[in-house]
Image (cartoon, rainbow, N blue to C red):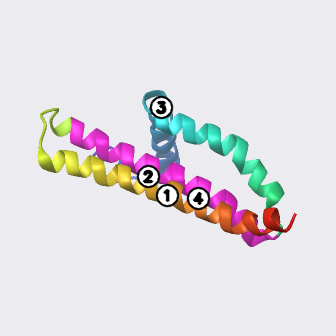
Amino acid sequence: MAGQNLTGLARIHAALFHSLRGFRATWRHEEAFRQEVYLFVVAGPLGLWLGETGVEKALLVGSLILVMIVELLNTGIEIVVDRISFERHELSGRAKDVGSAAVLSSLALAGLVWGLILWPRLAAA
């Protein structure tokens, strides 16, 4: 790969621009990622406001960031599978299904975190 011999600040600089290109491509081509970013834009500040301790704030916001991270990884899996072939294959379908299951699991985790932190306050009100 081009640039694999970079070191130090040049490597960090190159990695930053590769990552930004990945964010841009995912934003442009993945509706699910855009929806998760919109959710984060609304719920992220809400999590900082609703969390009473630093740990609660980190869990509320971090669980949302985790959803976006898993979506990025799932998108990478889908891109690689589609790059190999658009032909239907059991293993290709399974890879995409497993990636989708990972996204669903991260969403369930975020819901659990938010519920466990906020439910006691709502029940006491």
- Residue type indicated by callout 1: Ser
Task: Tell me the number on the disc at residue 31.
Answer: 3
Secondary structure beneath disc 4? helix
Name which of mark 2 and mark 4 comes first in the sequence: 2
The residue stretch that appears in magenta: 53-82
Q: Can you tell which of label 4 and label 3 is closer to the viewer?
A: 4
Q: Are marks 2 and 1 in contact (CB under 8 Å)?
A: yes
Secondary structure beneath disc 1? helix
> Majority secondary structure of the magenta segment?
helix
Disc 4 to disc 3, how far (Cα)?
Answer: 19 Å
What residue does disc 2 label?
103
Residue extending furthest right? 125
Decide: few, some or many residues near mark 4? Use Cα within 10 Å; few <14, some 14-19, many ≥20: many
Q: Is residue 12 visible?
A: no
Residue 88 occupies which quadrant of the picture? top left
Disc 1 to disc 4, how far (Cα)?
Answer: 6 Å
From the top left corner, tell me how far across and down residue 101 is, in percent: 37, 54
Secondary structure beneath disc 2? helix
From the top left corner, tell me how far across and down residue 26 is, in percent: 45, 36
